[in-house]
Every structure is written in structure tokens, then in C-alpha cells.
Image (cartoon, rainbow, N blue to C red):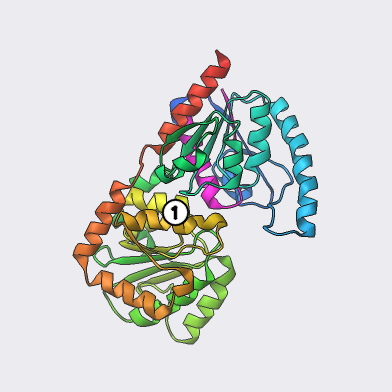
Amino acid sequence: MRVLIAGGGTGGHIYPALSIAAAIKDKEAAAEFLFVGTAHGMEADLVPRAGYRLQTIQLYGFQRRISLRNIKNVYWTLKSLWDVKKILRGYRPDVVIGTGGYVCGPVVWAAARSGIPTLIQEQNAFPGVTNLILSRIVDVAALGYAEAVPKFAGRKARLVVTGNPVREDLLTEDRETACRHFGFASDIRTLLITGGSQGARSINQAALTLHRYFFGKKDLQILHITGQTDYNDIIHTLNSEGLSANESGSGRIVVPYLHEMPKALAAANLVISRAGAIGLAELTLRGIPAILIPYPHASENHQEINARALESNGAAIMIRDAELTGEGLCAKVQELLDAPDKLRSMAAASTAMGHPNAAKDIADMALELAGRKNS
């Protein structure tokens, strides 16, 4: 059985793809996999690191305005369709799965038009334009949120609310081992701050106030993932103010990127983050209370819609990026730390929203589609 998976750009599109591949492999040991992405997306690092073969095409995302870059992108998109058809003829997949990102469009479109069984995975509560278009021709759309269902009304695809697939090791990590990995004490609460795989400047700047406020206090440990862009500035500011980080026993770690996110989530009692769909799926799988600051420029404002889904269920508190201040964030963190019953109720609500079997359910549907082709 040959499986082709298209998705890339950010970790939010790649990690679900890797989770689905692993779930298929568990069910069909002889399955072969080919990932299709670009050389400049995170898939160029993450897919080979996971042990899968990656074939790249030259393709770039469109800007939401008229520009010379968009005119060039029309050419690259048309050329990519030719390249994709060559890949499909050479690899002859039994099923094609798209997990998002601009590379997903031409790959899944060409596969569906060639009669190959196709499945797309929509991660957000408000579907992206590409998946709305693809849902007219693909066989199945696996949805991360029930709130997305009405947006697909009248489409060809069979709609299945599976939740979003996440890495299996998220559930295998235990807090004590994770804390020991970071040099943290397991009997002290840990705050995880992250802006996603690309980082978030507004969160990083507000987090500086948190570092100042909690410096020297022994009741909170901080793990801060800044993203590559802001890392040097954040470290420089902390060092210049005498706020030691990354020193043994300091109770604060600041890093540009972290491959061991399952360990970070296992250690965390509270998370401050953006509201990307896969990040939220990881939080709910672990049942972690969160303060969410949605990325304000996300297409169709989908991150705020994602965040509101958690907030309305009592699993998170949302702060709009435009309303974010260091002082306000500090006050909210301290308020939650002073209310353990509130944190416990948020954790329970978060757990109730988790979908631990999402990857397995999607793998079952992919195997069903492949069987339909081979029958």
C-alpha cells in the first residue's frame, strides 16, 4: 500500500501528517509513504527527521493583495500541477492525504482529478479556502471541530468530525520525568509560554513582564519558547536586567525552539500560547488550562474562532492580541495561580474536549479509501 501525504509550511500542518502516517503504519506495517512539500517549509527538516521520504515542488503561498509576487505564484502553481502529475504517475499512490498548507492544493486536486482516493484534514473551526475548494472533489474531509461542519454544506466530501491528530508521545510523557529533563522541580507549578513554531513578538514582549514579576519567587517555573526571530533580543533584555535564565536552579528556561514539546506539555500546569488548531489539540489531549492570544492576522480570523471554542467550554481564557499587555497578562496568571479550583475545572474542561483517537480514526478512513481503490 502506497500513501502520499501533502502538507507543509508550519508545524501545524506537518505534525498532523506525521501523526496520521504513524497511525497508518501501526495498522498496515507494509505501508509505504511519500511526503510532498517544499524545500523552504518546515517539512524539509521535520519529515526526514521522522524517517520519511520527502519530494519537494517549487510553490509559494499567495498574498491577500494584488502583487507582483502573486503574478509569479500563478506561474509556479501551474508548473506545480505538471510536477505533481509526474509524481503521481511515478509513485502510483493508493490514497492521497492533504493536511493543509498551500502545497496541499495542487497535490490533492491533481490526485482527485486522476481518480485517486483522497482525504483532507481540516484543523480549524473556520475552514481554510483551499480545503473548502477541495471538499468539492475529495472523498472525505476529517474535521478538527464540529463548528466547521456548516461551512462545508453541500460539498461532495463525506464529513467526519475526528478532532485533530497529535503525536502519540504526548500521552506517554509523565510530569516528573519531563520536569527532570528541564531541570525543574516536580512539586512546583510550571508555566509554558510559546508563540508557536514561528514565535510571536507580542507574546514575547508581554512575557518579559512575567519574567520580571516572578523573578526570585519560588512558586513558579517558566519555560519560554521565543521562536528564532526574537530569541537574541529576549535573552539580551533578560541578561541586561540581571534576570538570569538557562542557569541551573534558576527555574526559568528560554529557548528559540523546542523539539521536545511533548515533554514541555507534560511539565506544564498552565500554558500561554497562540490558538493554532494543532497546538490546541495538544493542550486538550493533556488537559492543560490555557491563556490564549490568537494571532490577529490569521486567515478568516480562524485562531480567534478556535480560541472561543475552548473558552466557551471553560477550558481557556482568551485575550485579544490588541488588548495584550504585560501587566494584564501578569495579573491573569497570578489570578489563576491563586485559584487552584479554577485551574482544576479548566483542566477538566480541556480534557473533555480532547480527541485521543483522531489519528487512528483518520488512518482507518485512509485504509478504507485505499481498499476501495484496490478492490
Q: Residue at x 56, y 77 (%)?
A: 233
Q: Is residue 361 above or below residue 41?
A: above
Q: Residue at x 77, y 57 (%)?
A: 69
Residue 185 falls in image quadrant = bottom left
Residue at the limit of the structure toward the front, as seen here: 154
Q: Residue at x 54, y 65 (%)?
A: 227
The quarter of the picture where the C terminus appears is top right
The quarter of the picture where the N terminus appears is top right
User: Which span of residues is magenta-colored?
Assistant: 1-24
Position in image of residue 100 (x %, y %): 57, 44
Can you identify the residue that label 1 sits on?
A: 279
Q: Is residue 5 magenta?
A: yes
Position in image of residue 24 (x %, y %): 48, 30
Q: Is residue 179 magenta?
A: no
Question: Mark 1 Cα within 10 Å, few/some/many (few <14, many 20+)?
Answer: many
Position in image of residue 188 (x %, y %): 26, 67
Q: Is residue 238 above or below residue 131?
A: below
Q: Nearer the viewer, residue 8 or 259?
A: 8
Residue 71 appears in view: yes
Q: Is residue 51 above or below residue 192?
A: above
Residue 173 appears in view: no
